[in-house]
Every structure is written in structure tokens, then in C-alpha cells.
Image (cartoon, rainbow, N blue to C red):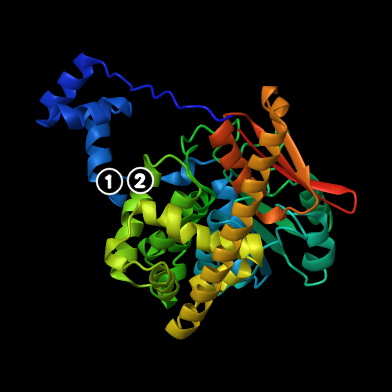
């Protein structure tokens, strides 16, 4: 039994609409849109409409940002091995790439590691420290889009002489991991106001601060200072894909990034766009969300996310085209598995209608693919309007994903 949606249309304050109309000399329609987004002043409206990177607030006020940039600078000049550990979704992948490319340009000894979704799971684990970081003599680990809950792994690393800098945007536990720096705008003691950033947005803010810190030390006298605007194509991908609110910095990043994507600069993105059957100059945020992002995510869901990293970092159009075709195939495979699972669940609920009397749906099967549990759970929520947990079981062990 599915349910019909009851749309509630937001009614703006008429006085506020009139005020914005008078201030901006704009139509009531535009004023209504702005007021419904709580944009009530001339300054906020101008910032929203101009949407320029020039309006970017300085991110130096984010807690631990100063500690992070100093530690990274030390690792660069002392030739320490730096490891970037990222999440396997588009947000984590793009955050990994922008930090990797910046540090490579700065001359750092840097590599990256993205866990296998099914074999290793999410975020920094103790096994990453004992089996990879320590044997490879990593001096500094920087997490992107993950790490805020990795207490045991961070403690092991720090106790073993490997520093950890966490950059993340997920809700943070009451007790933070004992890292050298925790750069997460959602920290309870952080009042910088960057709470809406995606993981790639936090990583980009780190690069803004790091570039300035290095500039103040005359670091760029031997090489041209990098133009961070060139990373905005990746920041836009990760930001839109992670479905964070497109306001403030996120809106600036996405607008600038779409402009860069339309110029066709990065071979991997252009190849992926072509594989989607669209052209660069027609790409919008909807295309990122529903065409590009699912194909990039298919790497982590069906294979390994490092394939998406290779796509976004290659300079060779032929290599990019080959990887894009592979991701397209993986996405088609993902869609087929997802469709089969969803139909199986609908059929199961039809034969067991009593389950729909429950306020929450919890379903399991030994035949489900772990990589698409979250997507299918979202579809079940959309159809039946109930929080849903789907669990894939194997050898007596269940791995699940929930949506509400």
C-alpha cells in the first residue's frame, strides 16, 4: 500500500516580499523565491544573486584550520609521506582528487587510499593503520569526507607516531577522535558558520587556507601559485552529488564549477558527460545529480572507487573515454540489480501486507547486493513513507543501510 503525497505550499510574509521588491526593484515572483529561502536583506539577496567566489567568506575561522595547515606545511617541507584517505562516494572521491592534485603540485610526497565499500567499509579503520600506514611509513594521514567517528583508528595512528588530520562534514560525536586536527564545521565548538558544506567543500576550504599560509611564507616563489578556481568543477560535482543545500558557499562553488565544466577542461568529466549522451555546454546541476554522480558512484558500489579517481585525474582523453565507458556499464549493472531488488521488495510486501501496519520496515535477504542497499531503501521510503532498513546477509553476518 503506497501513499499519496500531500504538498504544502510555503506562503511568504507579504510585507517581506514587498520590501525585497522595493529594495531590488524586482518582480514579486523573484521576491517570493528569495523570501521563501529566508533571504531578507539587500546584502543577502545581492550575494545570492551575484553568486561570485568574490563573496566567499574567509574559512580561516573553522576550528583547527590553523593547526591543520601548519602540520601539512611541515609534512611538505620535511618530505614526510602523506596519505589522503577518502570516502568512496562522489563527495569523497572529488575531495580526494583536489587535495591530491594540490599537494602533488606543491611537491609533497603524497598518495591516496579509498577503502573498498564491501570489503572494508566506511571511513578510517584500524586495519588501514596497521596494514598500510605503518608498513609504508606514512607520517601524516589526512581524511576527507570521513573520520569524525574513527576514534580507535586515530588513537592507534597517533600512538604509533603517525599524525592524523580529519576533514569531514558529518555529524560529530560528543567526544572527538584524538587527532592532530579535526576540521569539521559541525564541531560543537566551531562557530564559523560553514555547517552546510559537503566534504569536498571542507577540503576546498582547507586548500584556500593552505595556499594563503604558503603564500605568506613565500613558498610560491619557485612555482606559480595555483588557481584554486580550477578545482571548482570537482567541488561542484561533490557538492551537488551529496545533496547539501545549494546556498551560500555551496551555491558559489556549484555555479563556478558548472561554468568550468561547460568549458570542457578536465578530460575525465568531458568523457563522462559524453558517455551520458549530453554535451558540456548543456550541463546543469540536475545532470550532475542524476547522470554524472550515479556513474561515478557506480565505481564504489559495483567495483572500486579508485577507478573514478583515475578518471578524474587523467590527462589522456582516450584513457578517460575508456574509463567513462566502463563506469557507464557499471551503472547499467547497478540499475539492473537495483530494479530487481526493488521489485522483489514490492512483491514481498504485497504478499505480507501486515508488514505495512508497522511504523518501520526492516527487511533482509541473502541475495541482495550491499552496494545498492541505500538507494533501494530510499525508493522504499518514497513509495511507502516509512523509515526503512535493508539488510544483506552472508554467512550469518548482516550488513545494512537505513533511510527515513
Looking at the picture, does residue 362 appear above or below residue 199? above
Query: Going 69% across and 28% down the picture, which residue do you hit?
Result: 353
Say which residue label 1 marks: 51
Front in this rendered view, residue 324 or 14: 324
Task: Tell me how far mark 1 sits from mark 2, CA to CA.
Answer: 7 Å
Q: Is residue 196 above or below residue 165?
A: above
Other residues around mark 2 within 10 Å, as few (<14) / some (14–19) / many (≥20): many
Note whether residue 106 is visible.
Answer: no
Residue 164 lies left or right of residue 217; in this view the side is: right
Between discs 1 and 2, the one toward the N terminus: 1
Residue pictured at 9% horizontal, 30% vertical: 25
Give the position of the C terminus as an image quadrant: top right
| Element type where label 1 sits in the image | loop
Q: Nearer the viewer, residue 127 or 322?
A: 322
Classify the position of the N terminus by image quarter. top right
Residue 30 falls in which quadrant of the image? Answer: top left
| Rendered view: 294 above or below 342 | below
Residue 324 in percent (x, y) is at: 49, 73
What is the x, y in percent for residue 54? 29, 49
Q: Judge whether residue 120 can be spotted in this image.
A: yes
Q: Which residue extends farthest right?
A: 396
Q: Which structural element holds mark 2?
A: helix
Mark 1: few, some, or many residues within 10 Å (few <14, many ≥20)? many
The residue identified by callout 2 is 251
Looking at the image, do the residues carrying marks 1 and 2 touch, with CB atoms under 8 Å apart?
yes
Residue 370 image position (x, y, % from top left)? 72, 53
Amino acid at each position: 500500500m503506497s501513499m499519496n503525497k500531500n504538498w504544502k505550499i510555503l506562503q511568504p510574509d507579504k510585507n517581506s516580499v514587498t520590501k525585497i521588491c522595493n529594495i531590488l526593484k524586482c518582480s514579486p515572483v523573484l521576491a517570493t523565491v528569495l523570501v521563501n529561502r529566508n533571504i531578507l536583506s539587500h546584502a543577502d539577496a545581492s550575494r545570492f544573486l551575484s553568486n561570485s567566489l568574490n563573496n566567499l567568506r574567509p574559512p580561516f575561522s573553522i576550528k583547527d584550520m590553523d593547526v591543520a595547515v601548519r602540520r601539512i606545511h611541515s609534512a611538505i617541507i620535511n618530505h614526510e609521506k602523506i596519505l589522503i584517505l577518502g570516502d568512496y562516494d562522489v563527495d569523497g572521491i572529488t575531495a580526494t582528487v583536489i587535495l591530491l592534485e594540490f599537494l602533488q603540485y606543491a611537491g609533497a610526497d603524497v598518495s591516496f587510499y579509498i577503502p573498498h565499500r564491501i570489503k572494508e567499509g566506511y571511513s578510517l579503520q584500524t586495519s588501514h593503520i596497521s596494514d598500510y600506514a605503518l608498513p609504508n611509513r606514512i607520517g601524516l594521514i589526512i581524511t576527507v569526507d570521513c573520520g569524525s567517528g574513527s576514534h580507535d583508528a586515530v588513537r592507534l595512528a597517533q600512538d604509533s607516531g603517525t599524525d592524523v588530520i580529519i576533514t569531514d562534514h558529518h555529524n560529530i560525536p560528543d567526544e572527538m577522535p584524538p587527532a592532530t586536527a579535526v576540521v569539521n564545521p559541525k564541531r560543537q565548538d566551531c562557530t564559523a558558520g560553514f555547517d552546510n558544506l559537503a566534504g569536498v567543500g571542507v577540503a576546498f576550504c582547507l586548500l584556500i587556507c593552505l595556499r594563503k599560509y604558503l603564500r605568506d611564507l613565500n613558498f610560491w616563489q619557485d612555482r606559480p601559485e595555483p588557481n584554486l578556481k580550477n578545482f571548482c568543477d570537482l567541488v561542484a560535482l561533490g557538492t551537488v552529488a551529496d545533496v547539501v543545500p545549494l546556498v551560500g558557499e555551496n551555491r558559489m562553488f556549484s555555479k563556478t564549477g558548472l561554468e568550468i565544466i561547460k568549458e570542457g577542461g578536465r578530460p575525465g568529466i568531458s568523457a563522462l558527460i559524453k558517455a551520458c549522451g549530453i554535451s558540456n555546454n548543456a550541463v546543469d546541476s540536475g545532470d550532475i545529480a542524476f547522470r554524472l554522480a550515479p556513474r561515478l558512484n557506480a565505481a564504489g558500489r559495483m567495483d572500486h572507487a579508485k577507478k573514478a579517481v583515475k578518471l578524474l585525474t587523467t590527462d589522456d582523453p582516450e584513457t578517460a573515454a575508456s574509463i567513462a565507458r566502463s563506469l557507464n556499464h557499471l551503472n547499467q549493472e547497478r540499475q539492473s540489480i537495483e530494479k530487481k531488488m526493488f521489485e522483489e521488495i514490492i512483491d514481498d510486501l504485497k504478499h505480507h501486507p501486515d508488514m505495512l501496519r508497522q511504523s518501520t520496515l526492516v527487511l533482509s535477504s541473502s541475495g541482495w547486493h550491499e552496494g545498492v542497499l541505500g538507494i533501494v531503501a530510499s525508493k522504499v521510503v518514497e513509495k511507502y513513507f516509512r523509515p526503512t532498513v535493508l539488510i544483506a546477509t552472508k554467512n550469518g553476518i548482516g550488513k545494512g543501510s537505513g533511510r527515513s
